[in-house]
Amino acid sequence: MDNGNEFKNITFGMAAAETEKTHNPNLLIEGFLDANGYIESLLSSNTFLILGPKGSGKTAIASKLELISESDKSLIVKLYYLEDFPYAQFSKLLPINEAPQTRYPNYWEFLLLISFLESFSRNKDTEYFDTNIYKNIVKGLQDLGLTPGQSLADMVKTVSKKEFRINIASVINIAHMSEKAKADYGIDVIFQNLRELCYTVKAKCKHMIIVDGLDDVLTKKDRQYESLIALIQAAERMNRKFLKNNVNSKVIILCRTDLFDKLPGPNKNKIKQDYSKTLDWYQDVRDVTSVNLVKLVNLRAKTSLKREVDIFQEFLPSEIRSGDPTVKTLLDNTRYRPRDFIHLLKNIQEHTKGAIPTVGEVWNGLRTYSLNYLIEEITDELSGYLTPEEIDNSIKLLGSMNEIRFNLTDLEIKKNTDERFNSLELTRILNVLFDSSAIGNVRRNNFGEDRYTMKYRNPYASFDPNKTITIHLGLCKALNIL
């Protein structure tokens, strides 16, 4: 077989879409599967909120839109990542004496309007209701240290500086006021001008501001939760104003489903129903070759090999577990997320010595995937819900059962007889493990068939302590259970 057509030479992708965009953009250009039309929905409808579990492809959508904008001059996309965002400084950003539910959306609107103004300036055909105000506000913002290309975090840090408020008076020529009054009035003037400019602009290009990285702020701090729901509310409000005024612009928010579910606020369901799309890759079908994850990896293999290909027919053994096709066995070891499936195939590649992997090499890849990827990925997902010590002891507790299935009583006995686990709050921890798909429930139906309940199969499912507990198949090698 030609070396270029060997299984180990197929490029399936990377863990992070932003890295993939830099190092192998063609995988996102030609190897991006959008079976449910998410891109078109963001471009052409009122959808602005993309929800999905960790590793489901949210950032891939943002990266795809960025790549589209590089070749399509009618689209300008700017991606902001909430990395190391200063929530403490954000909570007192502007002189607004209102409750967080009122002032936080205004804070986000202020920051995002500055971002849009910079985006509008990148297109020479943009028309403003008052060119002089536009020029003055752009110069004023630059004089105050708000330079083009700043991250949202850097904007917060700049606005929070004492020098920012001191310099406002001179920038907009305020006199005959106290220093505090000048600063407060000056910010009001800037904010009002930003609103007038951005909500009345005539832009021939479509401008999109994408905010990603909400996954990285998953903590128990109320201030962060209040800030994030305010971001979503601000985006909804701004998008309505853009639409009402025929401004071809949109704010897009990418958010983990589990994080969104925990955010405060009475109108979340309205936003979810009217303005969101949820990334869901699970499909319960008889023909596993029709599953979108299978189509995705075959599309990426096609992009890599430059020809149509079914990797499961051409490269992989037909079975590695009696009675099931290999593709089903591999999918059963994932949580039906692109990142899981791609990593599993890459781990099999690492063990493949010839042109195609043997049965033993596929099993070696599954073991590496379980030990080096899935258990680490789930551990990352538990961060923010459990302490590092709780995570470590919870994983050890599961492994100490030495069985893939057990009941709650047996687990409680193990917890209470091993001092390592005595302090674990079992009810809370089992719910968190269930939500990450580390465990599920299983019951036997009237026909003697097992029926599994896993979060990745049904996002509305919840842990049932009265049913048998089962460990996710993909974790078993790492826990030394099979």
Image (spheres, helix red, strand yellow):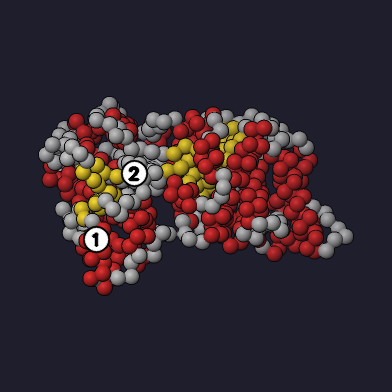
- Relative to 283, residue 473 above or below: below
Helix, strand, or loop for circle 1?
helix
The residue labelled by disc 1 is: 409
The residue closer to the viewer here, 480 or 261, is 261
Image spot of residue 121 (x, y percent): 66, 39
Disc 1 and disc 2 in contact, CB within 8 angstroms: no
The residue closer to the viewer here, 130 or 43, is 43
Q: What's under tag 1, amino acid-wise? A: Thr
Crowd around label 1: few <14 · some 14–19 · many ≥20 (10 Å): few
Residue at the right extreme, as displayed: 176
Task: Give the spatial CA distance, label 1 vs label 2.
Answer: 25 Å
1 or 2: tag closer to the N-terminus: 1
Image spot of residue 338 (x, y percent): 34, 41
In the picture, which quadrant includes the N terminus?
Answer: top left
Residue in view at x 62 percent, y 53 percent: 101
Helix, strand, or loop for circle 2?
loop
